[in-house]
Image: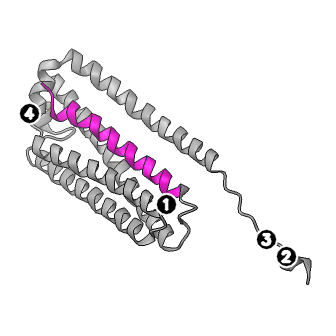
Amino acid sequence: MSSSEHTVTHVHRDDVASRMGMWLFLFTELLLFGGMFILYSVYRYNNPDAFHLAAKELNTIIGTFNTAILLTSSLTMALSITAIQRNNKSLSIFFQLITVVLALGFMVNKYFEWGAKFSHGIYPGSDELLSKPAGEILFFGLYYVMTGLHGLHVLIGIGLILLMTYYTVKDVITHDNYMKLESAGLYWHLVDIIWIFLFPLFYLIT
């Protein structure tokens, strides 16, 4: 027998380095939103009454519903990782797709919420918004920038999870090689955590 028949190809996987890289990326995301939260805090401190008044324009019911959706999606994402760890491929795929459906539901709600504001003339640069006090203009400027950036992260998360679903179907992600799915889960949990901060800051001002 030739020596080539005894050759075994080993694929190097450095899961520790992959996790470290993912955590470093998540840290940069926290720095980005952390800076925005600090900016929000400064403006709110200087304009408490205007921020309180502007917050009344937001739909607390939709905000609460979206919070419940994202919290549920974090659960389904975690369940998809648990399922693949237990070598239940079909269940993992199911939970990944449920996570995507919930994320899309979040974006649909956000679309209608933004649409309502636009229909009332409250959007960046509009005459209606510019006629308001400076504090309210700042509030809505931060609202659109921060929730819009968060929405972009949700869309990226949807694409990422769909890619993980494809990898799971093709057995790139398996019960003994699920680092990619775990990293996608960490990203999705970060997206949810950011919303947990955005929700009270904009919708529950007292």
Are there few (<14), some (14-19), or many (20+) residues within 10 Å of tag 4?
some
Q: Residue at x 63, y 45 (%)?
A: 17
Residue 180 x/y as whole percent:
53, 57
Amino acid type, callout 2: His
- The mark nearer the N terminus, 4 or 1, is 4
Tell which tag, 3 or 4, sits nearer the viewer.
3
Secondary element under disc 3, as helix, strand or loop, is loop
Density class for disc 3 (Cα within 10 Å; few <14, some 14-19, many ≥20) is: few
The dominant secondary structure in magenta is helix
Q: Which residue is mark 3?
A: 8
Residue assigned mark 1? 85
Q: Mark 1, residues whose alpha carbon is within 10 Å: few (<14), some, or many (≥20)?
A: some
The Cα–Cα distance between marks 2 and 3, rounded to whole angstroms, is 6 Å
Q: Relative to 74, does residue 129 appear above or below in the rendering?
A: above
Q: CA distance from mark 4 to mark 1?
A: 45 Å
Q: Residues within 10 Å of mark 2 (few under 14, many from 20)?
A: few
Q: Amino acid at mark 3?
A: Val
Q: Amino acid at mark 1?
A: Gln
Q: Quadrant of the N terminus?
A: bottom right
Provide the residue designation for mark 4: 56
Give the label on residue 6, or none: 2
Asked whether residue 155 is drawn in magenta, I would say no
Question: For the residue labelled by badge 1, is the local secondary structure a helix, a strand or a loop?
Answer: helix
Nearest the camera: 4 or 52? 4
Upstream in sequence: badge 2 or badge 1: 2
The span shown in magenta is 180-206
Q: Mark 1 or 3, which is nearer the eye?
A: 1
Left or right: 140 with respect to 166?
left
Q: Residue at x 27, y 52 (%)?
A: 72
- Determine if residue 85 is in view: yes
Nearest-to-viewer mark from 4 and 2: 2
